[in-house]
Image (tube, rainbow, N blue to C red):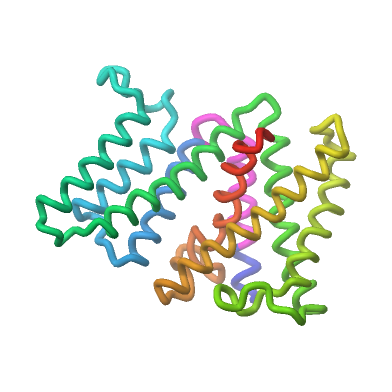
Amino acid sequence: MKQRIITAIIAGAGFITVTIIGAWPFTLLMIGIATLALAELLRMKQVKILSTFGILSFILMWLLVIPESIVSFQWLHIPRLELFLLLIVVLLALTVITKNSFTFDEAGFLVLASVYIGFGFHYFIYTRFLDNGLALLIFILILVWSTDSGAYFAGRSFGKHKLWPEISPKKTIEGAIGGIVLAVIIGVIYLLIVPIFDSWVMTILFIFVVSVSGQMGDLVESALKRHYSVKDSGQVLPGHGGILDRFDSLIFVLPILYLFGFI
């Protein structure tokens, strides 16, 4: 527990500092974290990171994460999305070229993994550089962390009914509700100090979406770990596991907020 607390303080302080600084340090940090997260997924699937297929998956993910201001593909006269789709075609062609030693299922995993990580961190960067991006991103971080804390303590104190035992045996319905309640309380306090929305209806809806989708993101990663029979996604953060163990909620929340028109 002591190691877990020390890691949380040091890593959390460093992450918040770089988030406040913004600009290229924040962008480079997000690209680096996204790269480590994808590496963890590849290890779960037992795909060698420096293999042809591993490198292709990194390229797919970087196409989604790295901003146009850092790497531009205008000289190719091909939009990024079309280049991304072209690489998917290449992956499918490799299933034929390798005579199915590289299978359709493996190609599907690499594409889905790059989209899962790529879009999550893409919208992380996108949100930070909005006009009110810093206040909004800090708000989202606070809501996700409040949800995690509320779910943990409510689950331990009142948890009786399992939320989804086939995926995460320890999570309870009472814990999930506790996470939402604490997120609402902390979120309202934050917005009384740093106003972001004009409407309280919009505020409560935003908090609810973040809290629920954050818990869903946590369950998605739990399902991945259970499927691949691993306890933690990695060992990058002592006492906390891997990058995905810390960012699973956030990379699920941000694309959903974008799709719902909140960011």
Q: Which residues are magenta?
A: 8-26
Q: Is residue 140 left or right of residue 205?
A: left
- Return the residue nearer the eye: 248 or 11: 248
Q: Is residue 34 above or below residue 109?
A: above
Residue 85, given in percent of the width and then of the height, sits at: 31, 36
Is residue 233 shown in magenta? no
- Which residue: 20% across, 55% down? 51
Quadrant that contains the C terminus: top right
- Which residue: 72% across, 71% down? 152
Q: Is residue 229 left or right of residue 59?
A: right
Overall secondary structure of the magenta section = helix
**Total residue callouts:** 0
Give the residue furthest to the bottom: 160
Is residue 17 shown in magenta? yes
Q: Is residue 137 above or below residue 96?
A: above
- Return the residue nearer the eye: 8 or 74: 74
